[in-house]
Amino acid sequence: MQKRAYTLKELNAMVRDAIETELPDEYWVQAELAECRESRGHCYMELIEKDELNNTPIARSSAKCWKSTWNVVRPYFERETGQRLHAGMKVLLKVYAQFHEAFGFSWIVTDIDPTYTLGDMARRRQEIIAHLKAEGVFDLNRELYMPLFPQRIAVISSATAAGYGDFCNQLADNPYGFYFSTQLFEATMQGEATEQSIIQALNRIYLSVNSFDVVVIIRGGGATSDLSCFDSLPLAENVANFPLPVITGIGHDRDESIIDMVAHTNVKTPTAAAALLISYLKDVLDAINQAEATITRRVRSQLEMEKLRLNRITSILPRLFPTIKARQETRLDALYNRISSHVGQTLLTCNARLITLEQKLPLVAVQRISTEKHRLAIMEEKSKLLDPTLLLSRGYSITLKDGKAVRDPKSLTSGDEIVTRLEKGTIKSIIK
């Protein structure tokens, strides 16, 4: 019996019929987006499910959302979640099965439930916040002191963003004439590259961190759906740990993003960030003016008090002068009498001492001369005993070399000339 052979198209048609028969309904499916792209108005997705223990894929399938449906569900989803569909997002899709003979199997998306994604986003946000708090960095940037004059500003923004221009213009045209110095550190502010781009900009600022007072991260004119990148753990860690106060003005009205939470100060828009800096300087100026007024008032008050005190002293002095003069004259007279008495007594004492010394001096001189004569006689006798001629007269001799007495024969060498002194003359010898 000959085997029945089907064409591939026939076999695929049978699969299509089987799927349409067995799976005729629409189903809600939970999945993670491994890929999401638009082409010609249609949305093409790659769905994936991962093992909860080791995070490895255990199921995968493609899905499509046709243009007519996509134009309806996409705006609603982005409006509700504030984000675009992107890889890594968990979604709840309403789908039906479709198998095409030429293109194979895929799920056709007819609806997307934003509440499921919002729940997953909220869970992820809470996990990131809990992680930052566990690390002890959640409040680090908010604990930094804002500089008294935050005028050197490092700005992270897209160079072409309208919000960046508004920010700079508002600072430059402030009504108080405050001077601000801004330097742009350009970064991508929407799309998948945003996270790393902002982190790189922060790293560039860190290289010259002493040149700035604050960092401002602003974004204007972008879609609300591009805000998911600001709920990033690595970006939040970099902002929280940054050594300068960070001000965010990302430009949205929904709940705060995570970098808004960890930043020193967050406002809604770039112009609000500029207004914040201007207002802060105005408050500082008001405080300085108030302090100046307080100091001036207190100095004036003190001067008035001292003037009154001086006037009172001036009025009292003429009345006190005769009394003070008489008192001082009496004191001077007493001092004069004491000095005169002391000088007279001292002179008498010194005169008596001189008379006594004059009487003792001849006796002391005679006694001293007698003592010194006796000491000289003793020294004369000692010197005679040490006279070398006495030794020579007793039969001793002295050997000299170069005029110096020879004490050790080892100090002489062959050929040396020595002189021997005797009582009655000298002898010259050569050492052999």
Image: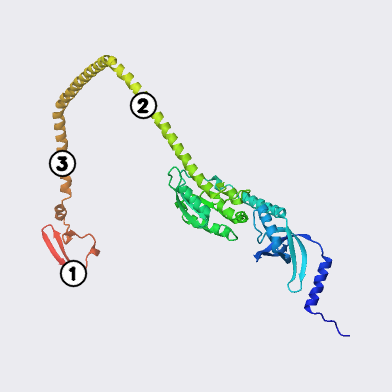
Element type where label 3 sits in the image: helix
* Mark in front: 3 vs 2: 2
Q: CA distance from mark 3 to mark 2?
A: 86 Å
Q: Which of these two is toward me, 60 or 236?
A: 60
How many residues crowd mark 1 within 10 Å: few (<14), some (14–19), many (20+)? Answer: few
Question: Which label was assigned to residue 376?
Answer: 3
Horizontal and vertical percent position of residue 49: 73, 62
Quarter of the figure with residue 86: bottom right
Question: Which label was assigned to residue 415?
Answer: 1
Q: Amino acid at mark 1?
A: Gly
Give the left or right position of residue 69, taking residue 1 as reference.
left
Q: CA distance from mark 1 to mark 2?
A: 105 Å
Q: Amino acid at mark 2?
A: Leu
Give the left or right position of residue 163, taking residue 366 as reference.
right
How many residues crowd mark 2 within 10 Å: few (<14), some (14–19), many (20+)? Answer: few
**Which residue has dot 2 on it?**
303
User: Which residue in the rendered view is the most extreme toward the bottom?
Assistant: 1
Judge whether residue 145 can be spotted in this image.
no
Q: Which of these two is toward me, 325 or 274?
A: 274
Quadrant where the C terminus sits is bottom left
1 or 2: tag closer to the N-terminus: 2
How many residues crowd mark 3 within 10 Å: few (<14), some (14–19), many (20+)? Answer: few
Give the left or right position of residue 81, taking residue 394 as reference.
right
* Mark in front: 1 vs 2: 2
> At x 46% / y 37%, what residue is drawn?
287
